[in-house]
Amino acid sequence: MIKDTALCAVRVYTEEKNVMEELMKAYSVDLREKIVKAYLVENYSIRQVSARFSVSKNLVHKLVKQQRTEGNVEPKRRGKPQFSHLTSIEAQETVREIVEQNPDATLAELCEKLAEATGNWVSSTALCRCLQKLGLSRKKKRDIAAKRQRKEYKS
């Protein structure tokens, strides 16, 4: 009984999450242009436009203001812009040198070494992304591979 209730709750939560994601999508540019045209060209009031297109009055006001100030009604990007100190070529070369000097270092240790070298602290996630872009693997050699290398070296 409790398991069924928990599964039902998870299912409802997942469905609500999917519905919220659908509700939160930006309106299409075509609809935005029609809303602005109805207000500016056809001289409908904000209330009439909002009722006609089933949108809020605030959206109509926002779109008209955006059209007047920016000259377009494109949806704006949501969320924070991504920034990293590791995008420059010099920083990437520094990362490459640090990894070559410290091949067995953990991400946290590499972050500390990079902070000492550049003066900019970066998160381990950002450093991991940078290493992936540079094609540098964080994997250590396994015992079998190390033994093979030793055998090849001896012969």
Image (cartoon, helix red, strand yellow):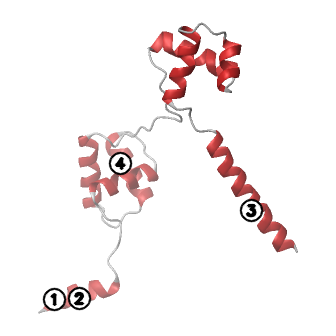
Relative to residue 133, is residue 119 depicted above or below?
Answer: above
Residue at the image point whose x is 27% and y is 47% from the top: 92
Residue at the image point whose x is 34% and y is 67% from the top: 104
Give the amino acid at mark 4: Leu
Q: Are marks 1 and 2 in contact (CB under 8 Å)?
A: yes
Give the amino acid at mark 2: Arg
Of label 1 and label 4, which has the lower sequence position?
4
Give the CA separation, mark 2 to mark 4. Answer: 33 Å
* Residue at which label 3 appears: 10
Give the CA separation, mark 1 to mark 4. Answer: 35 Å
Q: Which mark is residue 7?
A: none
Relative to residue 95, is residue 4 depicted above or below?
Answer: below
As drawn, is 86 to the left or to the right of 51? left
Q: Residues within 10 Å of mark 1 (few under 14, many from 20)?
A: few
- Residue 145 pos. (x, y %): 28, 84
Of label 2 and label 4, which has the lower sequence position?
4
Q: Which mark is residue 152?
A: 1
Q: Which mark is residue 148?
A: 2
Give the amino acid at mark 1: Glu
Mark nearest the camera among 2 and 3 is 3
- Residue 21 pos. (x, y %): 63, 45
Give the CA separation, mark 2 to mark 3. Answer: 50 Å
- Residue 22 pos. (x, y %): 62, 44
